Image (cartoon, rainbow, N blue to C red):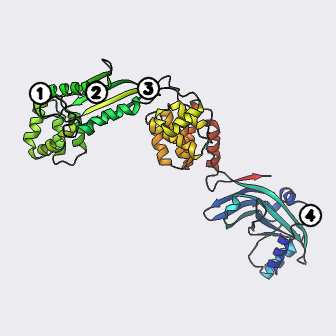
């Protein structure tokens, strides 16, 4: 019978009268109101000062906390509380009223209320009401009231990304680099363009030059060539070979393009021990560490090569046949400048056809014409960091775009190359906050604030809020 009466109370809550807010606030004070999403439940805790609430002996109040969705289409009730006057209280006791409600006698004790319902997503933005139903001895409702006592809001971190404009380049200086493995007859310095694989190797150099020489926006400013010989044979002869072969290659290029005197500069390394060391370090050679120890000694080059050959003949034979030929190479660098693009239309055209010709500031200008966070906006900064992999501003901007799309691993790698400016410290805080490490995030934000970064103060305030509502991040805003 009592369960039916509770249902009638819930159905009749549209009646007008004294608001539940006033009943609760003035006659039955509420404290410690707390509503949290924990695991799969929405839990409600509060204290009701029922010892100060008086109901006549033949009256009772049924209080039912109810969550109602923001649009009013969904609702769910927590466990009711019955505060009964003397006669009704003992009648419930005698009848052994079912335990769907908590029963208390008015004016006798305070109530520590705790109840839970199954969590549903709409509860993240809902209204908490306490429905009050007053009834007398005949189990008939005589007054029904319902008013909001709180609003529920899920507290989510809202990042503000700190992009920076790179310093504008007064002159756009670029370079193209490569290595060619030009073959020369044994112990000779003459260059034969058709000898062995020379057509393909020489085409690496000329193709790189041609790729920029015919561009009206580009001006080649200089070329650098460095020749390397391998460690076998007398060091003095390797000096002759490295120097002579480099000079021959320089003359070949000069004759093809009629570059002025001094336009191509050169250098040479008689024996490419750095290249040999790099190979051995990464190899699985037997006696690898021992061979590396010899390479790292201070003995002269001829003695060093002889010791490896004498002590580890099998490994030396492998190196001589498979590694030494690759150590004989010519590295080249084509230095050039590109004119500046003055209009956004020009910049966007080059962005889609030859992005390698844009400066860091031109990439940034292109991005500013796009919707922040859009795919094309993010792609601009991703392209910029590919063109300028060591530029701090480009890495910071790329980290921001990576965080926008949820790629936190890439964002961390970019931030490792972004420097130590206050805006970078702030970005590290954003990354930590997105990964829900609010304590670490606050540390970064406070550091950035102390260094003068303006956005950091608001971020610190957000972190304080996130920590306060870390368990489910549900906030109660009392009306």
Instruction: Give the quarter of the image for residue 136.
Output: bottom right
Q: Which mark is residue 337?
A: 3
Q: Position of residue 227 (x, y in %)?
A: 23, 29
Q: Which mark is residue 237?
A: 1
Q: Residues within 10 Å of mark 1 (few under 14, many from 20)?
A: some
Q: Nearer the viewer, mark 1 or mark 3?
A: 3
From mark 2 to mark 4, how far is it between C-alphas?
A: 97 Å
Would you say the residues marked 4 and 1 are in contact, meaning their CB atoms lie under 8 Å apart? no
Q: Position of residue 257 (x, y in %)?
A: 32, 25
- Circle nearer the N terminus (4, 3): 4
> Left of 302 or right of it: where is 338?
right
Q: Residues within 10 Å of mark 4 (few under 14, many from 20)?
A: few
- Circle nearer the N terminus (2, 1): 1
Reading the image, the residue beneath label 4 is 16
Would you say the residues marked 4 and 3 are in contact, meaning their CB atoms lie under 8 Å apart? no
- Circle nearer the N terminus (1, 3): 1
| Residue beneath the point at 18% across and 47% down | 285
Q: Which mark is residue 253?
A: 2
- Circle nearer the N terminus (2, 4): 4
From mark 1 to mark 3, how far is it between C-alphas?
A: 39 Å
| Residue beneath the point at 60% across and 36% down | 368
Instruction: Give the quarter of the image for residue 115.
Output: bottom right
Q: Nearer the viewer, residue 475 or 167?
A: 167
């Amino acid at each position: 019978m009592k369960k039916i009466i509770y249902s009638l109370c819930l159905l009749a809550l549209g009646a007008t009268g004294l608001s539940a807010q006033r009943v609760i606030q003035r006659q039955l004070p509420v404290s410690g109101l707390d509503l949290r999403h924990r695991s799969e439940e929405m839990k409600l805790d509060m204290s009701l000062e029922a010892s100060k609430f008086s109901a006549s002996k033949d009256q009772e109040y049924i209080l039912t906390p109810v969550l109602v969705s923001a649009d009013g289409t969904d609702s769910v009730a927590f466990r009711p509380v019955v505060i009964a006057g003397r006669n009704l209280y003992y009648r419930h006791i005698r009848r052994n009223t079912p335990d769907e409600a908590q029963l208390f006698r008015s004016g006798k004790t305070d109530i520590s209320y705790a109840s839970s319902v199954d969590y549903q997503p709409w509860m993240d933005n809902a209204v908490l009401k306490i429905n009050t139903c007053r009834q007398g001895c005949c189990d008939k409702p005589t007054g029904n009231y319902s008013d909001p006592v709180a609003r529920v809001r899920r507290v989510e971190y809202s990042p503000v990304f700190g992009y920076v404009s790179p310093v504008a380049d007064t002159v756009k200086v670029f370079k193209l680099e490569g290595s060619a493995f030009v073959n020369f007859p044994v112990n000779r310095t003459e260059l034969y363009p058709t000898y062995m694989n020379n057509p393909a190797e020489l085409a690496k150099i000329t193709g790189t030059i041609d790729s920029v020489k015919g561009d009206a926006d580009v001006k080649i400013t200089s070329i650098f060539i460095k020749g390397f010989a391998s460690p076998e044979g007398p060091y003095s002869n390797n000096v002759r070979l490295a120097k002579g072969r480099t000079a021959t290659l320089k003359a070949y290029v000069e004759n093809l393009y009629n570059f002025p005197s001094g336009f191509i500069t050169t250098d040479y390394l008689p024996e490419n021990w750095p290249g040999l060391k790099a190979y051995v370090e990464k190899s699985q050679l037997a006696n690898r560490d021992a061979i590396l120890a010899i390479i790292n000694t201070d003995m002269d080059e001829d003695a060093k090569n002889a010791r490896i050959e004498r002590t580890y003949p099998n490994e030396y034979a492998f190196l001589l046949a498979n590694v030494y030929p690759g150590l004989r190479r010519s590295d080249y660098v084509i230095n050039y400048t590109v004119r500046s693009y003055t209009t956004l239309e020009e910049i966007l055209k080059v962005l889609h056809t030859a992005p390698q010709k844009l400066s860091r500031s031109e990439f940034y200008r292109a991005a500013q014409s796009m919707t922040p966070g859009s795919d094309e906006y993010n792609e601009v900064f991703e392209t910029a960091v590919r063109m300028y992999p060591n530029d701090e501003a480009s890495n910071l901007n790329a980290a921001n775009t990576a965080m926008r799309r949820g790629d936190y691993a890439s964002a961390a790698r970019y931030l490792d190359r972004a420097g130590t400016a206050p805006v970078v410290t702030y970005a590290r805080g954003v990354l930590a906050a997105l990964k829900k490490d609010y304590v670490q995030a606050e540390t970064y934000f406070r550091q950035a604030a102390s260094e003068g970064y303006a956005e950091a103060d608001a971020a610190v305030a957000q972190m304080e809020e996130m920590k306060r509502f870390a368990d489910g991040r549900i906030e109660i805003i009392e009306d």
